Amino acid sequence: MGKFNGLKPFVKQVQPKVWLVMGGILIVLLVSWGLVRRGDSESEIVEINRAATAKLDPIIIKNPDSATARKMAEIADIFRRKRNAGFNGNVLVVQKGQILYQNSFGFAHLKEKDSLNSESRFQLASLSKPFTAVAILKLIQEGRVSLDDSVQRFFPDFPYHGVKVDQLLSHRSGLPNYIYSFPDSVRHGKKFPSNMEVIDWYAKVIPTPQAYNKPGRSFNYCNTNYCVLAGIVEKVTGQAFGQYLHNQVLAPLGMSETFLVTDTTSVAVKNRTVGHQFGRMLPKDYYDNVVGDKGLYSTAADIYRFYNGLMKGLVLDKKLLEEAFKPRSFERPGIRNYGYGFRMHTKEDNTPQSIYHGGWWKGYNTMLWVSPEDEAVIIVLGNSYNRSTYDIKEVLKVIHGSDKAGEIEI
């Protein structure tokens, strides 16, 4: 005890303020250690029900009945005609978990004449937006983000006030589109800006680009919304957007063929196609590294796993998924609407009749179409610009019957 008694004079000489400072430093160190440990745990791949994920793939119909065989033949004929009209890409049509049609047409690189196959990966373009919406909704489900949060909570210098996460998800923010906001002088600077650089540019540029509208006033489809949402994911998690998406959504669902354009590892670039227009390969675009609004490369099979996993409640709970599929745009009369990252055609009671999203970016055309009541999923991915990618009305007639399909607006 004697050696400890010797410390008493020293302890008494230390000022109370010093002890407070030292205590504060200790608390900061403990909190920082806790945050680091939390970040480490969150960087791991989330595990979900393996028995459920094993059943996400559609099955091949070995002995179709006559009605199913007729459907399969009619759908095959539709896509043969599309190919003759210039369609270059992959197709997957599933109903009630069974494959009605699956095929690949054309080439990954038109010049090299390397044939597409089921493992070929396509740039999803705006079909990436549902994935970004799900990433944000997952953070909302965990209580780390709120629909009512303003952008300033994450980016205090963001110059557009009153914009909430809810409005970003539903394209009701009124933000200007970054693709048209950047002047030529900015383009001459660093090539291929990231999401954070776009957000920082809006905060610093003078004059501030004019907003399209006041937040919440109207629906206006705008890529900036999903650029900012991906930035929020990075800000909240401390991870790159692609890393969080991979660990929390893609890998848990067994989506081993889906990667962001910014991932240049050998496993990520394997089987990537390139986009073409008028028969020519398109070079990398100035905005290619801005992700969330676009940027995912995937296969038809992986996209089906994504949708099926959502519907089985493996990523989001039922209540939050219903919010994603709730229509939030009623400025114009008609059945077309938008929820959180998903387009839809609505019924008279404002519930979704069809859920879908398309995409276009630098030669790529994509379409995911879902008819929940008929348990039908249509996935069309093209890498040589062709409007027929979006024209799936004939396929819907085969699946639903002519009368019901006639109500669809494509």
Image (cartoon, helix red, strand yellow):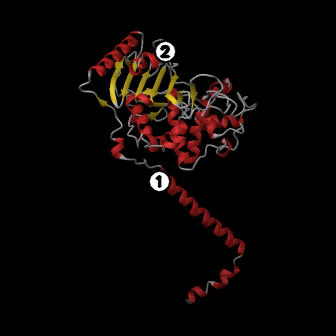
Q: Is residue 238 at least partly visible in the picture?
A: no
Residue 407: x percent and y percent?
50, 19
The image quarter containing residue 91 is top left
> What type is the residue that disc 1 sits on?
Ser
**Depth-wise, is mark 1 or mark 2 nearer the camera?**
2
Q: Please provide percent x and percent y for residue 286.
A: 57, 26
Crowd tier of the residue under label 1, counting other residues whose Cα lies within 10 Å: few below 14, some 14–19, many 20 or above? few
Label 1 residue SS:
helix
Q: Which residue is mark 2?
A: 387
Element class at badge 2? helix
| Sequence-wise first label, 1 or 2 | 1
Report the number of numbered marks.
2
Point out the image quarter for the N terminus: bottom right
What mark, if any, has residue 392 been given in the picture?
none
The residue positioned farthest toward the left in the image shown: 63
Q: From the top left corner, tell me how far across and down residue 321 is, in percent.
A: 51, 39
Query: Residue extending furthest bottom?
Result: 2
Q: Residue at x 47, y 24 (%)?
A: 367
Return the mark for residue 41: 1
Residue pictured at 24% horizontal, 27% vertical: 62
The type of residue carrying mark 2 is Arg
Q: Report crowding for label 2: few under 14, some 14 to 19, many 20 or more residues within 10 A (C-alpha).
A: few
Looking at the image, which residue sits at the far right? 207
